Image (cartoon, rainbow, N blue to C red):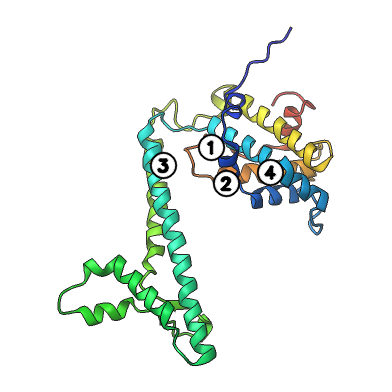
């Protein structure tokens, strides 16, 4: 009798918060993943979209989150996760502030170009918000010059359309800097890890291989549930089948996540042979 040993991925699946997973791996991710299984010019059938809505998205997101957490490769130190979580919150908030401020500035510029009248409500709101952000840095006796730099101003370029600069533009710089901090910190943490554990992946043993095979099998179950078709990986490596395209897209999306420091080998898109092996149609690689 063969005893099946539960992998870390299997264990993670039982504890993953499905609602949180759906936020990280959102509906657009689910739709675009299953779109890979369609011919390039064909839209997703309505019944497929409905199956995604009725459980396919949830199941796919849970599997993806479980796999990401199972192949994390960061040192087990809570302070690393806490620091990165704070910087991500700052980064994401800066992005939202910059986007919303751009929208307000563009609205007031468009209003003036269409009516010839200033849009005083939005202009005043942007000025006040910019001063709230930068006001403490104002130099005495240079208030007028300082305040003029915070006012929304149309971009003096005919190709700019209805776009403007404003006193919250620096939020973009905060977003860029936070992104750089996350990247540099991850490199630093990886560099501080012992040589025999840094970037540990499938070549160091069977652990990552087992996680990946279990994950691919679950992707096959979700694929069958949503599309009504059996997951297959053809022998032709050059001509990727629908399920292979689906799996490749999912792995590419995992590689873009910055939730944790990932085992770089474990998130590389698998070949058709590896997928076929995971599905039970070939020998181990």
Tell me which numbered mark, 1 or 3, is placed earlier along the sequence.
3
Q: Nearer the viewer, mark 3 or mark 4?
A: 4
Residue tagged by mark 2?
Answer: 23
Which element carries disc 4, helix, strand or loop? helix
| Pointer 1 local density, CA inside 10 Å: few below 14, some 14–19, many at least 20 | some
Most extreme residue toward the bottom is 116
Q: Are marks 1 and 3 in contact (CB under 8 Å)?
A: no
Q: Nearer the viewer, mark 1 or mark 3?
A: 3
Residue tagged by mark 4?
Answer: 57
Tell me which numbered mark, 1 or 4, is placed earlier along the sequence.
4
Tell me which numbered mark, 1 or 2, is placed earlier along the sequence.
2
Residue at left 35%, top 72%?
167
Comparing 19 with 206, the one in front is 19
Tell me which numbered mark, 3 or 4, is placed earlier along the sequence.
4
Residue 32 at x, y = what percent?
69, 51
Where residue 264 is drawn, which disc sits there?
1
Most extreme residue toward the front is 121
Quarter-of-image position of residue 285: top right
100 vs 34: above or below: below
- Compute the Cα span from label 2 to label 4: 11 Å
Which element carries disc 2, helix, strand or loop? helix
Residue at left 15%, top 79%?
141
Which element carries disc 1, helix, strand or loop? loop
């Amino acid at each position: 009798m063969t005893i099946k040993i539960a992998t870390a991925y299997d264990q993670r699946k039982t504890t993953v918060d499905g609602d949180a997973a759906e936020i990280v791996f959102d509906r657009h991710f689910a739709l675009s993943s299953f779109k890979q299984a369609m011919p390039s010019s064909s839209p997703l059938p309505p019944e497929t979209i409905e199956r995604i809505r009725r459980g396919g998205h949830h199941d796919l997101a849970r599997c993806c989150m479980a796999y990401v957490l199972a192949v994390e490769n960061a040192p087990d130190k809570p302070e690393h996760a806490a620091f990165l979580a704070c910087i991500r919150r700052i980064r994401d908030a800066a992005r939202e502030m910059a986007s919303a401020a751009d929208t307000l500035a563009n609205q007031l510029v468009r209003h003036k170009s269409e009516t010839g009248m200033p849009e005083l409500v939005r202009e005043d709101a942007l000025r006040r918000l910019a001063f709230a952000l930068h006001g403490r840095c104002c130099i005495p006796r240079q208030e007028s010059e300082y305040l003029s730099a915070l006012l929304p101003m149309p971009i003096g370029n005919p190709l700019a359309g209805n776009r403007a600069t404003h006193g919250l533009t620096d939020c973009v710089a905060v977003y860029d800097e936070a992104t750089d901090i996350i990247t540099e910190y991850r490199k630093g943490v990886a560099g501080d890890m012992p040589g025999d554990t840094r970037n540990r992946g499938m070549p160091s043993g069977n652990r990552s291989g087992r996680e990946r095979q279990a994950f691919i099998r679950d992707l096959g179950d979700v694929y069958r549930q949503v599309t009504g078709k059996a997951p297959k990986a053809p022998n032709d490596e050059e001509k990727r089948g629908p399920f292979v395209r689906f799996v490749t897209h999912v792995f590419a999306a995992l590689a873009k996540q910055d939730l944790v420091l990932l085992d770089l080998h474990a998130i590389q898109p698998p070949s058709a042979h590896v997928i076929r092996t995971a599905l039970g149609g070939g020998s181990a690689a």
